[in-house]
Amino acid sequence: MASSMLVPSVFCSPPSPGCIFRRRGGSPLVSFRFTSSGSERKKGFNRLALSVSAAAADSPPSTVLVTGAGGRTGEIVYKKLKERSGQFTARGLVRTPESKVKIGNADDVYVGDIRDIGSIIPAIQGIDALVILTSAVPKMKPGFDPSKGERPEFYFEESALPEQVDWIGQKNQIDAAKSAGVKQIVLVGSMGGTDLNNPLNNIGNGNILVWKRKAEQYLADSGIPYTIIRAGGLQDTAGGVRELLVGRDDELLKTQTRTIARSDVAEVCIQALLLEEAKYKALDLSSKPEGDGIPTTDFKDLFSKITARF
Ligand SMILES: NC(=O)c1ccc[n+]([C@@H]2O[C@H](COP(=O)([O-])OP(=O)(O)OC[C@H]3O[C@@H](n4cnc5c(N)ncnc54)[C@H](OP(=O)(O)O)[C@@H]3O)[C@@H](O)[C@H]2O)c1
């Protein structure tokens, strides 16, 4: 990422820039297998056993669109979906043709701008679920010289302020998804939104957490099954090696465990698509340091710890 794109994070310390079975449409998918008990074997009988928790080879893959697929977390989600082609048919939405090339230039990547609802409708038509990973991105003002001990200053480009991207742009995605009958939305936001004075709101006078929160509320009120994931400070480190922590109301921000790998956030997005326990929930998400705790593998248990709807 170019230095002009660095995003400061209040979560970093110090602050720096920086089954195969699933339910579809509410109906459990089931498969049958034949087993035989000892006595039945003697009698030559097979017994039909109903299995409701294993794989559903006959389940059509769920078509999932990831927006912000050219972004750092969005690209990971898009690639994870493609790796699990038995479960998902992946689509990506990027803002520019350059981003499309960057993530492989596949036909399943659409180009559109979330501020213009008409431009994103083709990507949304026909999907089962939507993962929202778009965000306004502040840019660093030129002339910053770290050798002078200066603090960098940031700004948002005109018409790419958080109000336009994180509020209008996310609202457009939710409205388009609702019109298209999308069955589920996973939205990645940020911890810190309970505090108007959170320093992230001062960046470029953008009030970014305020606008993100407004979009989250709009989603929770939409009637579409949703999961809102409010991540801690994002890190470009390996996923699957840390114990994940969930919380609510920014409680995790008061602890020393307030960061998380982008790859772990991406995996939680995927698991939210698969598990009923994630639906109609909003959760803060961070992780313990690597080597401290047991890496999370039971996502059902993770989502079950949360009861908050917003
Ligand atoms: N950075 C942190 O420490 C932190 C902490 C907590 C939560 N979060 C949140 O976590 C999420 C993922 O963060 P990230 O750093 O992985 O994301 P990112 O790399 O900043 O990606 C954001 C994506 O949004 C796209 N986008 C922006 N405006 C758009 C528009 N008008 N139309 C279509 N796409 C547009 C960007 O495309 P272009 O590149 O083409 O503009 C970019 O690909 C964000 O919501 C972020 O706010 C971040």
Image (spheres, rainbow, N blue to C red):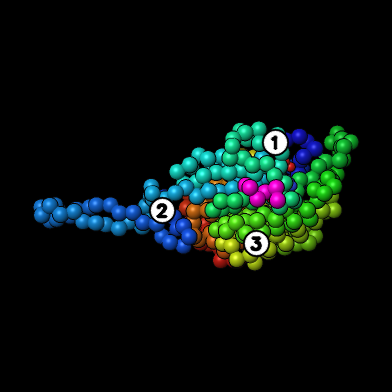
Q: How far is mark 1 from mark 2, CA to CA?
A: 36 Å
Q: Earlier in the sequence, mark 2 or mark 3?
A: 2
Q: Quadrant of the N terminus?
A: top right
- Residue range (magenta): 118-123
The image shows residue 292 at horizontal and vertical percentages of: 55, 47
> Residue 212 magenta-drawn?
no
Q: How many marks?
A: 3
Q: Who's the residue at 18% across and 53% down the image? A: 46
The image shows residue 8 at horizontal and vertical percentages of: 76, 46
Residue 231 can be seen, yes or no: no
Q: Which residue is mark 1?
A: 97
Q: For disc 2, does the CB lie below 8 Å from ligand 1?
A: no
Q: Who's the residue at 15% across and 54% down the image? A: 45
Residue 79 can be seen, yes or no: yes
The image shows residue 269 at horizontal and vertical percentages of: 57, 51
Residue 21: image tag = 2
Q: Who's the residue at 82% across and 49% down the image? A: 159
The image shows residue 24 at horizontal and vertical percentages of: 46, 57
The secondary element bearing badge 3 is classed as helix
- Closest to the camera, between mark 1 and mark 2, is 1
**Quarter of the rendering containing residue 219:** bottom right
Report the predominant secondary structure element of the magenta stretch: helix
| Label 1: how many Cα within 10 Å (few below 14, some 14–19, many 20+) | few
Q: Earlier in the sequence, mark 1 or mark 2?
A: 2
Q: Who's the residue at 55% across and 43% down the image? A: 90
Q: Which amino acid does the dot numbered 1 rest on?
A: Pro
In the image, taking residue 54 as reference, residue 47 lies left or right, namely left
Q: Which residue is mark 3?
A: 219
Q: Which amino acid does the dot numbered 2 rest on?
A: Phe
